[in-house]
Amino acid sequence: MIALQRRADPSRLMGYLAPLLALGITLLAGLVLFAVLGVPVAAAFYAFFIEPVSTLYGLAELGVKAAPLIIIGVALSIGFRAQVWNIGAEGQLILGAITGAAVALVFYENDGWYVLPLMILASVLGGMAWAGIPALLKTRFNVNEILTSLMLTYVAALLLSWLVSGPMRDPDGFNFPESRLFHDAALLPRILQGTRLHAGTLVALGIVLAGWVLLSRTLLGFALKVNGAAPRAGAYAAFSQTRLIWIAMLMGGGCAGLAGLFEVAGPIGQLLPSISPGYGFTAIIVAFLGRLHPLGVLFAGLVMALTYLGGETAQITLNLPLAVTGVFQGLLLFFLLATDVLINYRVVFK
């Protein structure tokens, strides 16, 4: 009989090295997968991991893809540290995109400097409002926030589909389900000429710094960590669990909403029926791969962004299905969880 036995003193060093180990095993598993599919391994490796970032434009695209993952991942990692499981960041991203786009369309004929700040404010509030629903249900009726936040994602997706097919549809768009193209005043400024790299990337770096300061230098960050590690100790220290749940949920919702705006006001430039390839869900992997630390999330976001670019490149150059991206992301999460289990438990034969 095979069983798991908890280790008395898990290695702290291996805890930090586990993401790198999981990433290495994922690469090996990916190479085996390519070989099974009959794809030249060297060509597949180059197309997936090297070619996407071999040019300045490719590096800029890496930043574009990584920005929403980092923004959401930092906020989720803070919530997860407090044992607040916000799994609905994808829906909150969609609501942020909707509310931010609504402002852009209301001020469609206006090129004032205040349009983009109003869009940012609206997107943050939209994401927070959507995250506030599971927060209310959790604190008032003790409803599991995992289920409610996740289910609201599908409600948000249906709401987006209805809006771009009806109230927010472009009147001159030949009945296609999409909004008008945003005015220049409603678009994020580009920070690298000839690429799509926008100011949202700098905001993502700022959020990483703010998250690190919050967790390591503030009483609120300490309270969130204590609430996650030892709720009874947090209650004894008079840290309100209800307040911390609200803060964690609203923080995650606000950042997800902001990421949604950066998509529609950045590389997309309008509201479409699909505005995210699953950034809200992938950010969960980013948070854990980054060990729930803002600096770790920064590097994890770049790694996961590379899987998106690699999947697109492999689809174009090797005719591989785009689903390869999801396969790599799933393998990485699986191996990360496996290494975590083996760090904390040993396999024993009885």
Image: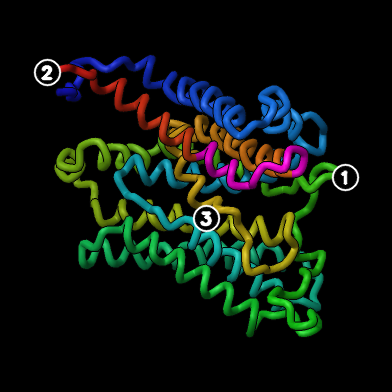
Q: Which residue is mark 2?
A: 350
Q: Which mark is residue 256?
A: 3
Q: In the rendered image, is residue 63 in sight?
A: no
- Percent position (x, y) of residue 206? 60, 41
Mark nearer the viewer, 1 or 2: 2
User: What are the residue bounds of the magenta stretch?
Assistant: 316-329
Q: Are marks 3 and 1 in contact (CB under 8 Å)?
A: no
Q: Secondary structure at mark 3?
A: helix
How much space separates mark 3 and mark 1, taking CA atoms?
27 Å
Query: Mark 3 or mark 1, which has the lower sequence index?
Result: 1
Q: Residues within 10 Å of mark 2 (few under 14, many from 20)?
A: few
- Compared with 4, 142 (above or below) is below
Quarter the N terminus occupies: top left
- Compared with 323, 263 (above or below) is below
Depth check: 85 or 173 in front? 173
Depth check: 236 or 245 in front? 245
Q: Residue furthest left?
A: 350
Q: Are marks 1 and 2 in contact (CB under 8 Å)?
A: no
Q: Are marks 2 and 3 in contact (CB under 8 Å)?
A: no
Q: Secondary structure at mark 1?
A: loop
Could you tell me the amino acid type at mark 2?
Lys
Quarter the C terminus occupies: top left
Q: Which residue is mark 1?
A: 194
- At 57% across and 79% down in the image, what residue appears? 162
